[in-house]
Image (cartoon, grey):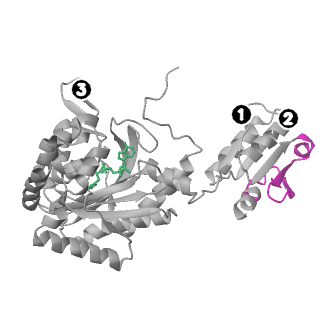
Amino acid sequence: MIKAVTGTRDTLPTDIPKWNFLESIVESVFSKFNYKEIRTPVFEDTNLFARGIGESTDIVGKEMYTFVDRSGESITLRPEMTAGVVRALIEHSLDKKQNLNKLYYMGPMFRQERPQAGRYRQFHQFGAEALGSNDPLLDAEMIIMAYDIFARLGLKNLLVKINSLGVPSSRENYKKILRDYLQPYFEKLTSESKKRFDTNILRLFDSKEENDRKIMEDAPLLIDYLDDESLRHFEKVKEALLASRIPFEVDAKLVRGLDYYTHTTFEVVSGSVGSQSALCGGGRYNLLVKELGGPDIPGIGFAAGMERILLACENENSFSVKEENLDLYLVAIGKGLENFIYSNAVNFRREGLSVDLDYLGRSVKAQMREANRTNSRYVLLIGGEEFDRGEVVLKNMGTGEQKIFTKDDFEKILLTVKEN
Ligand code: HAM
């Protein structure tokens, strides 16, 4: 038997109402903040991600689904959306049409990570990007939108962590200080951390190894070496969060796994989903648009993992979605009325009712069971002695009440079902 590829999942009809609910909240919150939806291709030129996310990151180094297509081009399934959104902004000169572009998206992303609960190889993100302004209020706005979405889903066990990575000049200066601090411990570091020492030294703060963590405990922190402008920016972000009653914590060791960040970075973690606890992450990327060949404009954004969010909702029992009701089930009594029943079903559907009928030649009893299983509000019984008299019976499945209509009283039946 052929099975779904490792790390990919089917979303079955029973799970769809939860996804629809999440998607509707995401759309509603983003549109309240005046973000417009953008859709970009699922695959892009590999160079976009290599340049955008950074050669030394885990994503580009070991997680991308990259292949050469039949025309010899290197293609990559998008591991995230920021690079694609920036490419689209540049390609369509969106920045010339308006100074600030506030965009949001939802869709599948692909990373070849080791699958576990909350971590998949095809997963879904929603996210937002604001391109064209360096205003710290936008940094706060990203965190507020994420927090509001989680709150509307009923999630409680949340922690907002924020940090500032400053600008490249202060960061380069700090990296030298961190290198000096780590030099005496170098031989004790894990081989992964030794590699990162040269390629991406900040990521040593992310090491899960006990020994690395001990060494990093007393490491100097970037936040203590920020330039004045970066500090002022960070202060304004914190003020805006306080004013919007968002509880947060400064986590000076939050470095994030993508290279494009400057200034603010943040994550919202949940205490309800085990080790894959980051529900969302984001930050400012003031150099990325230029780096990808566009104008020198700043950006900020975040993305959230939808599977993880739904897992947190499930574990916290934070919301329940109503089961879908069918308006009407048409039950055939006996044979010979198939065309009458079928054309009525089609007409009721065209008038806006959700309607189903039997396609399996089942008994009346089995059809009634099916009407119950589909939560039908009404059943229309068609056939038997009543039909011989020119009548059909409409049964309200909630109250058990039955009403008789003449068989061609389509409008009256429609009205009765619509009214309740
Ligand atoms: P990221 O931290 O790589 O950032 O991913 C954002 C979120 O996507 C994570 O917090 C997590 O919830 C979810 N996620 C990531 N990988 C997986 C996976 N393998 N399985 C399930 N969920 C996953 C970005 O992607 C940046 N583009 C965010 C951003 C936007 N920064 C600025 N603008």
Q: Nearer the viewer, mark 1 or mark 2?
A: 1
Mark 2 / mark 3, whichever is N-terminal? 3
Location of residue 244 (image quadrant): bottom left
Counting other residues with Cα less than 10 Å from the Cα at mark 3, is it few (<14), some (14-19), or many (20 or more)? few
**Where residue 126 sits in the image (x, y, percent)?**
37, 53
For label 2, the residue is 334
Mark 3 / mark 1, whichever is N-terminal? 3
What is the three-letter code of the residue carrying label 1? Tyr
Real-space CA distance between mark 3 and mark 1, rounded to the nearest whole angstrom: 44 Å
- Decide if residue 286 is in sight here: yes
**Where residue 134 sits in the image (x, y, percent)?**
17, 68
Mark 1 / mark 2, whichever is N-terminal? 2
For label 3, the residue is 69
Q: Which mark is residue 225?
A: none
Real-space CA distance between mark 2 and mark 3, rounded to the nearest whole angstrom: 58 Å
Q: Nearer the viewer, mark 3 or mark 1?
A: 3
Counting other residues with Cα less than 10 Å from the Cα at mark 1, is it few (<14), some (14-19), or many (20 or more)? few
**Where residue 3 sits in the image (x, y, percent)?**
49, 25
Location of residue 185 (image quadrant): top left
Q: Is residue 407 magenta?
A: yes
| Badge 2 element | loop
Real-space CA distance between mark 1 and mark 2, rounded to the nearest whole angstrom: 13 Å
What is the three-letter code of the residue carrying label 3? Asp
The residue under the point 43% across, 30% down is: 6
The residue under the point 20% across, 41% down is: 188
Q: Does any atom of ligand 1 lie closer than 8 Å to the CB of label 3?
A: no
| Badge 1 element | loop
88 vs 131: above or below: above
Q: Is residue 120 left or right of residue 142?
A: right
